[in-house]
């Protein structure tokens, strides 16, 4: 398919409403332990589950299990993240952007009163299939020189790499040659599966600390293509085989990796940048929280700029500290807004960054509106005295 035709078709997909793609929400109890959430993940064969709370929605994905030391005692409120909720009238381009930005594979949908379902990434990619330009190669979407692990490396080491690098796919190699793939799904499946994995028996103590080779549980038959494979054909194979990534090799050596997120970016509608400079210091290390925070703050600045067009710049400083005895962080956020005549600053603390920013936004709107009214009042008085 010619590039111009493909570009037009993809834009048409971006502009389609999501209503026909909405599926039932896969959710978990809001007060459950992670072991119960894991059961839902495995039973539904999904990457994440949702925890609806009125019109907002939390999410717990596989990455939380990799970072958690005890899923039997850890409760969902200590690890839940919050994501934007799509309106049921939203378009595919917006849903794809949220999935790409927040590194998730589904997004919740609301009718304005409650969460009514979700849109899955696979459904969006199915719409994309067959519409990618024929001259776009899979290598153009790939991340080159990806992190790897030797096939003799331990599952514990693989888990550490996935957590540290904040990724879900780790190619397995031997003397640079590709041997397989281990994912976050492979590892968390051990948290509840029987002690026999594949054809090899794993002693309980080794299973508990993941002290056995990744070769015992890896996918020994991942999708592998050469760099000149068309992106569209690669996507078709990925969807048909229910894989979540493709690996790129040349002369048996690993060259790169392309995940669902890389394909999702082709559908993502770019969100407009604020019209004023935006600076953020102290972003969370976790990509999910980092992307969510950047998107939230930029959205706030755009909203404020519509009401107060004289804003010159916006800054946010984030400080965090762990709660004693848990992995949960408490945040202190300061937002500073500068205009030609004034500088506004407000700080707030809380466990959830999106909620902290919501409080700050409301406070800043009141502060700036009050200051604006007071200035106008003084200007009128001064004008009356002059007259």
Image (cartoon, rainbow, N blue to C red):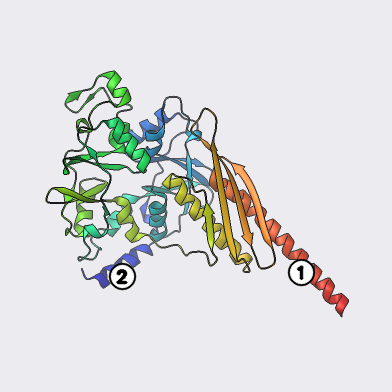
Query: Is residue 84 in view?
Result: no
Q: Measured along the vertical axis of the image, is residue 271 above or below residue 242?
A: below
- Whether label 1 touches label 2, CB < 8 Å: no
Q: At x 69% / y 60%, what residue is drawn?
A: 368
Helix or strand or loop: what does disc 1 sit on? Answer: helix
In the image, taking residue 21 as reference, residue 308 lies left or right, namely right
Q: At x 38% / y 39%, what residue is drawn?
A: 63
Residue beneath label 1, please?
376
From the viewer's perspective, is the residue at label 1 or at label 2 nearer?
1
Q: At x 63% / y 69%, what residue is drawn?
A: 310
Q: Measured along the vertical axis of the image, is residue 321 above or below residue 346?
A: above
| Picture disc at residue 8 | 2
In the image, taking residue 13 as reference, residue 245 lies left or right, namely left
Q: Earlier in the sequence, mark 1 or mark 2?
A: 2
In the image, taking residue 369 as reference, residue 107 lies left or right, namely left
Q: Decide: few, some or many residues near mark 2? Use Cα within 10 Å; few <14, some 14-19, many ≥20.
A: few
Q: Residue furthest top?
A: 204
Rendered location of residue 14, percent (x, y): 36, 63
């Amino acid at each position: 398919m010619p590039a111009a035709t493909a570009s037009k078709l993809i834009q048409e997909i971006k502009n389609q409403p999501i209503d026909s793609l909405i599926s039932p929400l896969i959710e978990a109890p809001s007060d459950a332990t992670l072991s119960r959430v894991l059961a839902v993940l495995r039973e539904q064969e999904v990457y994440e589950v949702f925890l609806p709370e009125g019109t907002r929605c939390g999410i717990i994905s596989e990455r939380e299990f990799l970072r958690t030391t005890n899923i039997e005692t850890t409760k969902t409120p200590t690890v839940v993240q919050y994501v934007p909720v799509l309106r049921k009238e939203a378009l595919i381009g917006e849903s794809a952007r949220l999935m790409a930005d927040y590194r998730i594979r589904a997004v919740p949908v609301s009718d304005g009163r409650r969460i009514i379902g979700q849109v899955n990434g696979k459904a969006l990619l199915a719409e994309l299939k067959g519409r990618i330009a024929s001259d776009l190669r899979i290598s153009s979407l790939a991340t080159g020189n990806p992190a790897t692990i030797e096939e003799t490396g331990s599952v514990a080491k693989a888990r550490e790499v996935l957590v540290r690098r904040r990724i879900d796919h780790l190619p397995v190699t031997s003397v640079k040659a590709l041997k397989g793939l281990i994912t976050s799904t492979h590892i968390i499946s051990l948290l509840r599966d029987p002690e026999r994995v594949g054809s090899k028996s794993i002693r309980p103590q080794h299973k508990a600390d993941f002290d056995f080779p990744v070769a015992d549980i890896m996918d020994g038959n991942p999708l592998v293509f050469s760099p000149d494979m068309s992106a569209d054909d690669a996507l078709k194979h990925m969807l048909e085989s229910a894989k979540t990534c493709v690996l790129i090799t040349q002369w048996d050596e690993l060259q790169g990796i392309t995940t669902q997120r890389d394909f999702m970016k082709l559908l993502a509608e770019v969100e407009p940048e604020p019209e004023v400079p935006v600076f953020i210091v102290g972003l969370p290390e976790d990509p999910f929280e980092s992307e969510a925070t950047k998107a939230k703050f930029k959205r706030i600045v755009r909203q404020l700029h519509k009401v107060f067009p004289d804003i010159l710049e916006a800054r946010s400083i984030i400080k965090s500290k762990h709660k004693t005895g848990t992995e949960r962080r408490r945040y202190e956020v300061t937002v500073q807004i500068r205009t030609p005549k004034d500088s506004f600053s407000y700080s707030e603390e809380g466990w959830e960054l999106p909620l902290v920013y919501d409080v700050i936004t409301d406070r800043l709107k009141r502060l700036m509106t009050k200051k604006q009214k007071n200035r106008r009042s003084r200007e009128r008085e001064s004008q009356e005295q002059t007259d």
